[in-house]
Image (cartoon, rainbow, N blue to C red):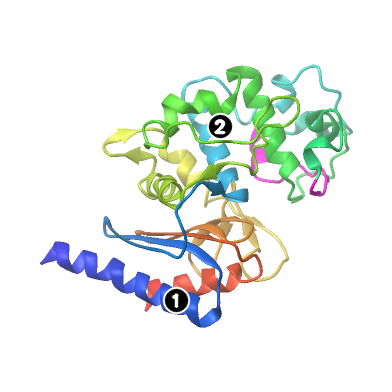
Amino acid sequence: MQQTDAVSRAQTVLDRIVRAAEEDGFGAHAAHVRVDGRTAVRHWSEDVPRDIHSAAKGVCVLAAGIAADEGLVDVDAPVSTYLPDVPLGNGVEAVSMRHLLGMTSGIDLPWSPTLMTDWPDLAREFLGRPTSGRAFQYSNASTYTAMRALGAVVGDVAGWLGPRLFEPLGLGAPYWEHCPNGWIVAGEGLHLRAEELARIGRLIGDGGVWEGRRLVSSRWTDALHSDWHEREAGPGYTRYALAGWGGPGDAWRLHGAYGQMLIFLDDAVVTITADDHLGADQMARRVVEALRS
């Protein structure tokens, strides 16, 4: 009876999400619900690898955490420790990998469609700009630079993660776009199927443990949604941790462009993949309503 109830709960939540998506005209690819260790899934289109966009920032945090667990890096050391040949802008000598992953470097470099090719070396450009202190400045260049620092220690981050994260999760060797200089673009460009993104969500929800094997310490999965940086912004964007956004309500999420989301609430993890940038915030609220009701 307990197993049946658990399956029913996941399916009931999924049914509500599906109904909400169809009522709103949300352009979903897939919805994957995990509650009480049971799952329910709906696909609107073929489950093929797609760019998870900024949800990849959470994978970058896991990569930094695994490296820290192995004693390879100190995320609180100045990033110049790992990129000593890069000239630093005013005040940047105090910027750490944690600041870069948490978007609190205070360095401003806006996103553009040609971000990876606008400068000969994006990390040099980013770190060469001045900082305004520990101010929040959301930038894909920030995550990219953090992974450049990690890459200085481990080499290609995607390849290094293979036996440590991707292979244990059954993801094989997923495609991660690289910049012209051969480094992962980091804050986006990781291509996963909805089911594979859901496995990342399950790992995070289970505190870094996958089928009895610890892949990353819980301090890093916790860091995705703790020590929030508070900011003035619209609903769902007022709190940011290491890659995680606070909300809706008391949920939190990894949120990529066009509606690639992992939404966490209590023991539940909901994975959404989509092609609907404008409808994603409403969909996140609908997911939390489905879980709460």
Residue 245 location in percent, x, y?
58, 57
Q: Position of residue 159 (x, y in %)?
A: 53, 24
To which quarter of the image does residue 120 belong?
Answer: top right
Residues at discs 1 and 2 in contact (Cβ within 8 Å): no
Pick the residue in front: 100 or 180: 180
The three-letter amino acid code for the residue at tag 1 is Glu
Q: Which residues are magenta?
A: 97-113
| Position of residue 162 in the picture relative to residue 92 (left or right) | left
Residue under label 2: 64
In the picture as drawn, the residue positioned furthest to the bottom comes out as 23
Instruction: Examine the rendered structure and indicate whether residue 31 appears above or below residue 200.
Output: below
Which SS type dominates the magenta stretch? Answer: loop
Amino acid type, mark 2: Ala
Q: Mark number for residue 223?
A: none
Instruction: Give the labeled residue for mark 1.
Output: 289
Which class describes the residues within 10 Å of circle 2: few (<14), some (14-19), or many (20+)?
Answer: many
Residue 232 colored in magenta in the image = no
Compared with residue 268, is residue 225 higher up or lower down, i.e. above or below? above
Which x, y percent locates residue 263?
Answer: 47, 60
Q: Residue at x 42, y 35 (%)?
A: 217
Q: Is residue 105 magenta?
A: yes
What's the distance in space between the residues labelled 1 and 2, CA to CA? Answer: 33 Å
Of residues 221 and 133, the one nearer the viewer is 221
Q: Earlier in the sequence, mark 1 or mark 2?
A: 2
Q: Residues within 10 Å of mark 1 (few under 14, many from 20)?
A: some
Give me the residue at 48% from left, 49% from top: 48
The answer, for residue 265, to whether it is visible in the render is: no
Q: Is residue 75 above or below residue 282?
A: above
Q: Residue at x 65, y 63 (%)?
A: 237
Asked where in the image residue 56 lies, by quadrant, the reply is: top right
- Screen quadrant of the C terminus: bottom left
**Looking at the image, which is closer to me, 31 or 228?**
31
